[in-house]
Amino acid sequence: MIGLIFGDTDFPREILKKIKQKKFKYLIIDLSQNKSFRKDKNSKSVSLGQFGKIINLLRENRCKKVLFAGKVKKPRFSKLRLDFKGVYYMPKIIKSSKLGDAAILKEIIDIFKREKITTINSLSYNPELTLKKGIYTKIKPNTIDKADIKKAISILNNLNRYNYSQGTVVRNKKLIAIEGRGGTQKLLEKSKNKKFKNSGVLVKFPKKKQDLRIDLPTFGLKTLKQCKSAGLKGIVLKSRQNVFLERKKCINFANKNRMFILSK
């Protein structure tokens, strides 16, 4: 049996759909804000601080492997309801939080490892949800677009030395915005400019220390529409290091709006 630790976004639903198709046995630990999986008979709703309960549920159901998917809102540690193991492990997580989100995720993986539970890659059952190298739209990057892409990748590579950002927007060789704690949505809001309607690129690559088993950059139709609203022409993702949802809808939308989707 596989343990599925699910947060928000559509990615967990795609995983669950595939697991049901393959008729695998599963247990869902539902950490989503709205308890999106409460109607599933194999779902258990648990507080983030209840490590003992989570581990006991996994053991009772003979889950030796866990898969993480979806976004879990970073909590206020002081407000968490902790059980005994939560009290034991929480100081380690709080300490790691000072080094950023990647360090928190690494610590959580280490906790499961200590409890003899293996964390597997989020795309283990859905390899079709990641993009290989190539251009996926009718529109291809022109000379100006290629210069913007080169500049954006160079900026991200430099930021990667500090493990800082996984997204940047460049327009006409000028840096417009860098993704910070507010995520991609805030990045694209900062990038809006009424003067431009089909110009500039968003490049989203994983950070250097990002654990790709549980923390892949995710892209779907909602984000693509936000790119369009920001006046951008193209989106560039890292080959096989992304989760690309609603592929057909995204490609159709991009073609209709003369945008390109590129995986490098």
Image (tube, rainbow, N blue to C red):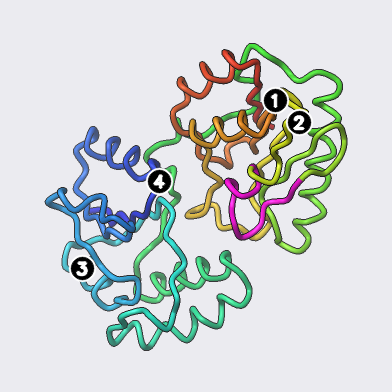
Q: Residue at x 22, y 63 (%)?
A: 45
Under circle 2, the secondary element is loop
Label 4 neighbourhood size at 10 Å, few (<14), some (14-19), many (20+)? some
Q: Residue at x 52, y 54 (%)?
A: 215
The residues bearing labels 3 and 1 have C-alpha atoms spaced at a distance of 47 Å
In which quarter of the view is residue 16 placed?
Answer: top left
Q: Which residue is mark 3?
A: 57
Q: Amino acid at mark 2?
A: Gly
Q: In front of the other: label 4 or label 3?
A: 4
What span is in magenta? 177-188
Under circle 1, the secondary element is loop
What is the number of the mark on residue 200?
2
Q: Are marks 1 and 2 in contact (CB under 8 Å)?
A: yes
Q: In front of the other: label 3 or label 2?
A: 2
Residue 226 located left or right of residue 232? left
x and y percentages locating residue 244 in the rendered image: 50, 34
In which quarter of the view is residue 211 placed?
Answer: bottom right
Q: Amino acid at mark 1?
A: Lys
Label whose residue precedes the other's in the sequence (3 or 1): 3
Label whose residue precedes the other's in the sequence (1 or 4): 4
Under circle 4, the secondary element is loop
x and y percentages locating residue 140 in the rendered image: 72, 16
Under circle 3, the secondary element is helix
Q: In front of the other: label 2 or label 4?
A: 2
The residues bearing labels 3 and 2 have C-alpha atoms spaced at a distance of 48 Å
What is the number of the mark on residue 233?
1
